Amino acid sequence: MDGTDRRADLRWVTAVRALDSLHRTTAWLRCASTAVLWASLAWTPPSARTHSALALLLATTGALLSLLHAHPEARARLEDFGERLPVVYRLFDHLDSTRGRATFNLPGLAEGFGMAVMGLALVGPFGPDGPGVPVTTVQLCAVMVFVTLVFVNIVCDAGYYAPSQHVKLGPDRSAGAADALLVLLRRLIPVGALLIAGTLFVPDWTASLTAVPRAARICAVLGVGAVAVVWWSFDRVLDAAVTTAVDIERGVRDAACRDLHSMSKTAVSMAVEAERSDHYERAEVRGLLREALVRIEEMRLDWLDPGRGPGGTVGTLWEAVLCVLPHKLRERCELDPASALLVLPSTDYQLARRVLSDLVANAVQAGALKVVVSVRLGGADDPRGGHVVRIRVTVADDGPGMRPDAPGQHSSLVVLNRDLDRYQGSVEFAARAGGGTRVVADWYSQRPADQWPAEKRRPAPAAAPPAQVPRQASVPAALREGE
């Protein structure tokens, strides 16, 4: 499936789910409009009440059916009646079958003919005489609100956004593109609605309608033009939502590819190095490959359910980093004891593991004989209010050092810096006095400081935050020793 097809699928599914919310809202508003019309009969002359009530029956039935159509949970509560009454069961089946399809359904037909009857027999050419100006004005406005909302539902129907091929995404299934005749009728609706409403309500058909100022009637008629505005706005929002979904999907795929590349490159290179070692041990190579497979599976589960795990201590994380290194290389790596007891939430735990895996592997592969790692937590004021936690990972080695242009040549550092930038973080490196390299990676946790786990030990004093967070604050109480 190419990008265009994928975008069409997302557009239809987004329209289906957006219209569910729109339909629920407009269904209640249409019921409210009919309730206002029924209430207005109290101020209608007794001789005209029967005529007006009959004019409202079909539209009211359609509004109630639409309300039932918009709330599947209400239909679920009535399923017992459906089993006893075949007619109810067939009605529910009909309502379910029309979701996401541009087609005629019973609520739509009832509302369509109902608004025509109201327009003709309530406030239009065949409306009763006798209601005063206030009652007729209220009825005219309520009818126009009802008509506008019905047409909004029609022009925004998700079936018009369905691609020609059948789509199945989650619980939603399409039935192909809308019929060409329906597409044509949809395009004619905004202009047609204005012409029909103008014909019904602007001329002086009855004494009651004549009593309402013509300017007021014209304003009420022009209100149906909101259909075109809502349609245009719905399309623009839909385009933005689909573009965002595509961008997010692309970002997730890029991140997954980077994670897989980083992890597999490290694991395979370490296994190859162990196999070429003068102290080759088959069991060690098997263990490295087994650990690599375990990490690939963990990575797959993290992609499917980000943040699925409870997080863990830095000590546990360190063991996962070392498990893919040959034994002789593990002996060169050391974790600061104070760092091992710190607890990181799930997202930060996974991010720290990715950072440490890349930085430690780069250091030992560059020939470092000693790699020292520390993790520190600090606090800062969030410009949006509250406190945020800053994670700072430092990897220092005694290797040959890095050239000033190294970040432009080593993709792992560039990728890490891009990933951490999403969390207001960065990766910086500097040469150490006496030789070697010191790499610092820091970022801000997405979890508020007051929601962090309480099992912490005293973190080292936090360094000055980057420019995005202007003021330094004390470490939150949850990060202090003994709390």
Image (tube, rainbow, N blue to C red):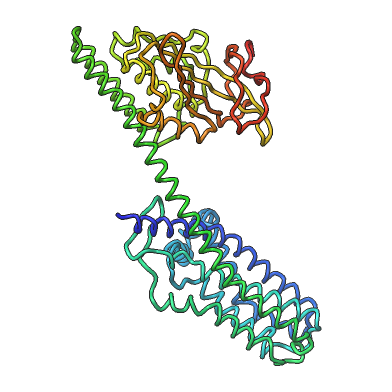
> For the point 46% across and 13% down, which residue is it?
432
> For the point 58% across and 72% down, which residue is it?
227
Q: Relative to residue 35, is residue 4 depicted above or below?
A: above
Q: Position of residue 60 (x, y in %)?
A: 62, 72
Q: Which of 29 and 17 lies nearest the eye of the viewer?
A: 17
Q: Which of 328 and 397 lies nearest the eye of the viewer?
A: 397
Q: Residue furthest front?
A: 404
Could you tell whether 83 is left or right of 42 in the image? left
Which of the 4 image quadrants contains residue 98?
Answer: bottom left
- How many callouts does the rendering have? 0
Q: Position of residue 35 (x, y in %)?
A: 69, 69
> For the point 65% across and 65% down, which residue is it?
29
Q: Which quarter of the image is occupied by the C terminus?
A: top right
Q: Position of residue 346 (x, y in %)?
A: 49, 27
Q: Position of residue 235 (x, y in %)?
A: 51, 64
Q: Relative to residue 233, is residue 378 depicted above or below?
A: above
